Amino acid sequence: MTATQCCCSHRLQVADVIVMTADPIDPDELRKQLFDRAAGAYCGFEGWIRNENEGQAVQRLEYEAYDPLAVTEGETILAEARRRFPHLHAHCVHRTGMLEIGDCAVWVGVSSPHRHEAFQACRYIIDQLKVRLPIWKKEHYVDGNSGWVNCERCAEHAETSS
Amino acid sequence: MKTITVRYFAMFRENAGLDAETLSIEAATAADVFSATQDRHGSKEPTGHCKVAINDVMADWDSPVNDGDTVLLFPPVAGG
């Protein structure tokens, strides 16, 4: 939990927050939570459902998560990001359930006084959560087949950014 | 013998055909529990790609298990 000075001089308690949700993600609404008079930079990342993976046409994606541990592990990642790249606020929201092409599956937002920490913290959070949170995705293909996705390439990216 | 409750997720749940089961097994570590479930359900996923939690806390494969523990077996994760 961190505290920052809000515009009206109240002490605004702002945690680094991770939320798992079955509801649609609205990044435009979420980024407002990161506003801060001390922030000169905001960096956001949206992960979208695309229509292809490794040569197979994808119809939709199904996300399964174990929410209790996804949240605690996500909080650990956010704390690591704060130590490594000091910033003002960092929030993350991850979807569960059945998602269609173009849907937002994950959003990460970071605000900070300067852009460098916002970029770095955002990159660190998304890379780490992809390989550490107990979340699984099942691709449903246009041809009617389906398969669980293993994220080995994500692990390589996480190693290079940590 | 220890009584261990095992919970399966995603691919493991589909392989096992159930969400959870309670086993009476000789198991010293989380890896022993994983191995026992693989013997039961014919899974061959290496531990290196998988994760494990004990009683809702992330653990290592060599973490000890105690009578009455719940072991959560996570196949390779793919968030984002």
Image (spheres, coloured by chain):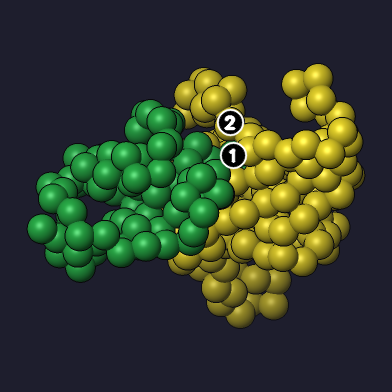
Q: Position of residue A6 (x, y in %)?
A: 65, 71
Q: Nearer the viewer, residue B41 or A87?
A: B41
Q: Position of residue A20 (x, y in %)?
A: 62, 62
Neighbour tally class for label 2: few under 14, some 14-19, many 20 plus, Cα within 10 Å: some
Q: Is residue B11 left or right of residue B55?
A: right
Q: Colour of chain B?
A: green
For disc 2, the marked residue is: A151
Chain identifier of the residue bearing label 1 in the image: B
Q: Amino acid at mark 1?
A: Ala
Horizontally, residue A79 falls left or right of residue A87, namely: left
**Residue A17 appears in which quarter of the rendering?**
bottom right
Depth check, front residue: A150 or B67: B67
Label 2: chain letter:
A
What SS does tag 1 mark? loop
| Residue shown at 86% from the left, 29% from the top | A57
Q: Which residue is mark 1?
A: B78
Q: Residues within 10 Å of mark 1 (few under 14, many from 20)?
A: many
Instruction: Judge whether B73 appears above or below A152 on screen.
Output: below
- For residue A111, side relative to residue B24 (left or right): right
Q: Position of residue A112 (x, y in %)?
A: 63, 48
Identify residue type, mark 2.
Cys
Measured in 3D between alpha carbons, the distance from the residue under mark 1 to the one under mark 2, in whole angstroms, is 5 Å
Quarter occupied by residue A116:
top right
Q: Out of A125 and A56, give the one closest to the viewer.
A: A56
Name the residue at 78% across, 36% down: A145
User: What color does chain A have in the rendering?
Assistant: yellow
Q: Quadrant of residue A54?
A: top right
Instruction: Answer whether labels 1 and 2 touch (C-beta < 8 Å).
Output: yes
As helix, strand or loop, the secondary structure at mark 2 comes to loop
